[in-house]
């Protein structure tokens, strides 16, 4: 069973501002988007960055941990000390882990659209990197797509996924 988190309007505002800052920083650096997604001033990047930030905050809220909402801190944990949040709006979505992701970090799949998110589960980076889960859809770099059924249950009582 997944954990459901409802963000308040104030929490959405805070996360949305971080998402906007992340998009602006990427545009200013002329950096391509995540995993081959083109960075542009128009298109889906803005909503992806905002919803991703909201998902990070939702996960931190469920864990009762501080969310630093950092900008430009690639490969650092989204929620210290070792939690990486991956977001999708697709109810049947999979958790994506890339080859260069930290093997010791915990990767959490958060699904939904503001204000409602549910946390589907988590997996260690090393455990996610199974050949059977490797895919390279739409000409983007290969990654590991972990089905929800293979994720560990999310446990908020231990403040640790």
Image (cartoon, grey):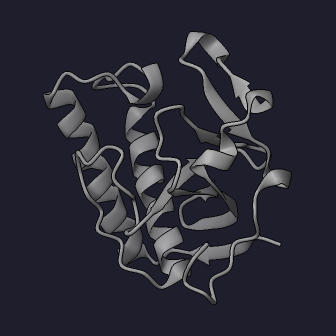
The reply to whether residue 89 is visible in this rendering is: no
Whether residue 57 sits left or right of residue 71 in the image: it is right
Whether residue 84 sits left or right of residue 33 in the image: it is right
Whether residue 85 sits left or right of residue 14 in the image: it is right
- Image coordinates of residue 100 in percent, x first then y, are 46, 34
- Image coordinates of residue 77 in percent, x first then y, are 39, 58
Whether residue 70 sits left or right of residue 78 in the image: it is left
Vertical side of 22 occupied by 39: above or below: above
For the point 34% across and 25% down, which residue is it?
Answer: 42
- Image coordinates of residue 43 in percent, x first then y, are 41, 25
For the point 75% across and 64% down, which residue is it?
Answer: 152
- Image coordinates of residue 101 in percent, x first then y, are 48, 41
Vertical side of 52 occupied by 4: above or below: below
Q: Quadrant of the C terminus?
A: bottom right
Q: Quadrant of the N terminus?
A: bottom right
The reply to whether residue 19 is visible in this rendering is: yes
For the point 51% across and 60% down, which residue is it?
Answer: 55
For the point 40% across and 50% down, which residue is it?
Answer: 50
């Amino acid at each position: 069973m997944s954990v459901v988190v409802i963000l308040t309007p104030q929490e959405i505002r805070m996360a949305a501002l971080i998402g906007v800052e992340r998009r602006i920083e990427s545009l200013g650096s002329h950096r391509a988007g995540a995993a081959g997604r083109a960075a542009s001033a128009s298109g889906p990047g803005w909503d992806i960055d905002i919803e991703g930030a909201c998902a990070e905050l939702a996960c931190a809220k469920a864990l009762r941990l501080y969310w630093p909402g950092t900008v430009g801190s690639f490969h650092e944990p989204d929620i210290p000390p070792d939690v990486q949040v991956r977001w999708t709006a697709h109810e049947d979505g999979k958790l994506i882990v890339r080859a260069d992701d930290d093997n010791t970090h915990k990767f959490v799949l958060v699904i939904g659209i503001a204000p409602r998110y549910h946390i589907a589960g988590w997996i260690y980076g090393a455990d996610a990197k199974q050949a059977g889960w490797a895919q390279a859809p739409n000409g983007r770099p290969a990654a590991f797509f972990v089905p929800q059924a293979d994720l560990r249950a999310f446990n908020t009582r231990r403040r640790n996924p």
